[in-house]
Image: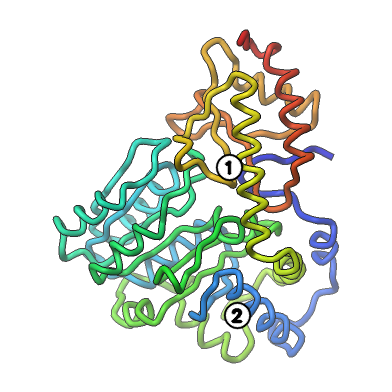
Amino acid sequence: MPQLRVPGPTPCPPEVLKAMGWPMINHRGPEFKKILYEVTDKLKLVYQTKNDLNILTGSGTGGLEAAVVNMLSPGDKILSVSIGVFGDRWANIARTFGADVIPLTFDWGKAADPDAVGDAIKANPDIKAVMVTHNETSTGVTNDLEPIAKVVKDAGKLLLVDAISSMSSIDLPVDKWQCDVVITGSQKGWMVPPGLAMASVSREAWQAFEKAKMPRFYWDFGKAKSYYEKGENPWTPAVSVVFALSVSLDMILKEGLQGVFQRHARIGQMTRDGIKALGLAMFADEKCASNTVSSIAIPDGVDGKKLMQLMQSEHGIVLAGGQQRLDGKIFRIGHLGMVSEKEIEDLLKALKYVLPKAGFSG
């Protein structure tokens, strides 16, 4: 079986895949009500929140759209803090629905500067919300969210967080940092197939929801909340993925949140050290390098596509390439969710063998 080392979808434990085959149940019956409540309570433990939490059927991008349309009205000014492809995508979603987006972009491979975020808020005091990506998989960078959150909340603004590739892998205490809406997706560190987006919603966010005028139907947080009180989703949920999530959550909580975070930090550092030992350079600034995905600069003379093809055909290891303007300039190694030191050791050994075949002479 190939070793899937992309930033998502991620490998799923056998127990999780087995749960996908459980018999189907009535999504408006007592069995689903029980599992929905149990899964939601466990999700709140990982989120480290007492806020409401909605389980939505869709991709992470759907969750990002939900955050926009539930919190904003056309013409609202929002500050978009972007450090890569997915930060830019979220800004484009907001523009699509009529938001007045003020972009604050940083060099790809670098993290956002909290002081710059504060300066941008001061320069635009009428902004309603700040959108920020916690972990940017396109560049392999994790933002230092805590000081950014402090700047945003001290200014009295809504804080919307894309935690799709960080939540459950990198520490993000939602309530402690006063994050208003936090989005994640099942296919990342949760070790579950694609199909679910999760969104926590603070009391302040619900106040914004009551005033928001952007069009929404499928992604309506209000409908999700009212149906949850009955033990249902407003629409047909991805029942089998909820089954899978119930199993993966038990595995995460058994390992312990701090254990999960420490494992990802340890494996992230191991990957970076191993890459440098091979004579390669990290693309991301190591001060903010992600513990869930590593971005590696492709050296001159190396055929990146051939490198990835050989890794898969000769060693069964699937890597990710660069996106947009980083296409052909970096390759990426996902190490989130179900990942072990042994798998990274095998990957690094394979990479050492394959690199010369792809043109590396270092």
Q: Residue at x 57, y 58 (%)?
A: 59
> Looking at the image, which residue is at 58% across and 14% down?
302
Mark 1, secondary structure of its residue: strand
**What is the distance, in whole Å, between disc 2 and disc 1 at their CAs?**
32 Å
| Residue 241 in view here | no
**Which of the image's four quarters has the C terminus?**
top right
Q: Amino acid at mark 2?
A: Asn
Q: Nearer the viewer, mark 2 or mark 1?
A: 1
In the figure, 258 relative to 210: above or below? above
Q: Amino acid at mark 1?
A: Val
Tag 2 residue:
233
In front of the other: 221 or 160:
160
Which quadrant of the view contains residue 316?
A: top right
Label ID, residue 282: none
Residue 183: x, y in percent?
A: 50, 64
Q: Is residue 328 above or below residue 110?
A: above
Give the left or right position of residue 236, taking residue 161 as reference. right
Q: Is residue 274 above or below residue 341?
A: above
User: Pointer 1: what residue?
Assistant: 293
Task: Identify the mark nearer the N-term, 2 or 1.
Answer: 2
| Residue 255: image location, x then y, percent | 73, 63
Where's residue 260, x and y in %? 66, 58
In the image, taking residue 343 as reference, residue 290 lies left or right, namely left
Under tag 2, what secondary structure?
Answer: loop
Q: Quadrant of the N terminus?
A: top right
Badge 1: residue crowd in 10 Å (few <14, some 14–19, many ≥20): many
Q: Residue at x 43, y 30 (%)?
A: 325
199 lies left or right of 80: right
Q: Position of residue 118 (x, y in %)?
A: 23, 56
